[in-house]
Amino acid sequence: MGVFGPKKEGVAMNSGSSGGRWKLVVLIPILIFGGFFLFSLVGVIETGNVGVRTTLGKVNQDEVQPGMFLALPAITRVEQFSAKEIAVELNDMTPKAKDNLSLRDMDVTVYYHVMPEKVAEIISKYASQSTHLPEENFWRPAYNLVFSISRNITYEEVSKIDSLVVHTRRDEISILIKNNLQAELDRNDKGVFQISRVILRSITTDPAIEESIRLAVSNQKKLEAMKIQVDIAQKEAEVKITEARGIAESNQIINQSLTREYLQHEANLALHKFAENGNTNTVVVPANMNVAPLINLPAGSKQP
């Protein structure tokens, strides 16, 4: 009995140790699997984005706010959408101008965002219009919709301007695109979209148009130079006219002041100068002078 007793006790101890190991072997995978399962239920919405929850194919109209969320795989899916400003690149466009000449290249960037509380509504309404870039972990809501409308409005606005001057009206075109795009989006979805800005990055016209623009600019510069020359000539002529007018007015004043009595007075003064001179002088007296000249003869000379 004493011999078999300890042996049985030893067997019991070994059996308990094996059972504990078996439990650990079973429990650890369960815990790991449970951890992965719980991890799969949790997601995070980044700041500036909102989540749109879809349950069994139906879109929930209450957006998931930034932070952690729970979702049941195969039942509930939460996708992240940007509520920040999004850039829409419109590149390599060739719109026709008012004179039916096409631009060689035109690049425009449109910046927009969707109101955070309207994202789920837009996703439901325009299910196929959002886009997702491979390098991004979020969707761009209604990106394709904004892209197509922006492109159409750009072509429409350029068609109202002649190709020779379209490059000089970049700011005006940008403003027109922004305002008209906002109005078009508001027409169907008031208060959903916000167009923050439109930048016209480049306009390249056809080479033939470029040459026409160059000639037009050159001719404009020549015209401006000629106008300046005309202005200078006019100013010089005005100066000469002013000078001539001044001389004429001066002569008129002098002529009005040369009365008969004044001329006689001046003649008398001149004759008096001759008379005071001690030398012999010859004085020619005008035939119509009524006053005889007074001539001073030197002392000792004989009077006739």
Image (cartoon, rainbow, N blue to C red):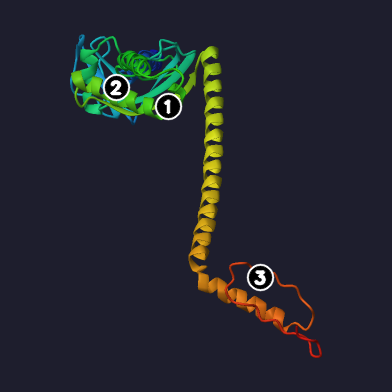
Q: Are marks 1 and 3 in contact (CB under 8 Å)?
A: no
Q: Which mark is residue 285?
A: 3
* Residues packed near mark 1 inside 10 Å, few (<14), some (14 to 19) or many (20 plus): some
Determine which quarter of the picture holds residue 81. top left
* Residues packed near mark 3 inside 10 Å, few (<14), some (14 to 19) or many (20 plus): few
Determine which quarter of the picture holds residue 93. top left
Q: Is residue 61 above or below residue 220?
A: above
Is 3 positioned to the left or the right of 232 in the image? left
Which type of secondary structure does the marked residue at label 2 adopt? helix
Residue 249 position, x and y percent, is: 49, 59
Of the residues shown, which amino acid type is indicated by label 1? Arg
Instruction: Looking at this view, name the residue that lies furthest to the right.
Output: 300
Residue 153 position, x and y percent, is: 32, 17
Q: Which residue is identified by label 1?
A: 170
In three-dimensional space, the C-alpha distance between marks 1 and 3, rounded to whole angstroms, equals 87 Å
In three-dimensional space, the C-alpha distance between marks 2 and 1, rounded to whole angstroms, equals 16 Å
Of the residues shown, which amino acid type is indicated by label 3? Val
Q: Which residue is identified by label 2?
A: 181
Q: Name the residue nearer the viewer: 193 or 235.
A: 235
Of the residues shown, which amino acid type is indicated by label 2? Leu
Which type of secondary structure does the marked residue at label 3 adopt? loop
Which type of secondary structure does the marked residue at label 1 adopt? helix
Q: Residue at x 21, y 23 (%)?
A: 186
Instruction: Looking at this view, name the residue that lies furthest to the bottom.
Output: 300
Decide if residue 245 is in sight here. yes
Determine which quarter of the picture holds residue 49. top left
Q: Is residue 144 above or below residue 230?
A: above
Considering the image in quadrants, where does the N terminus appear? top left
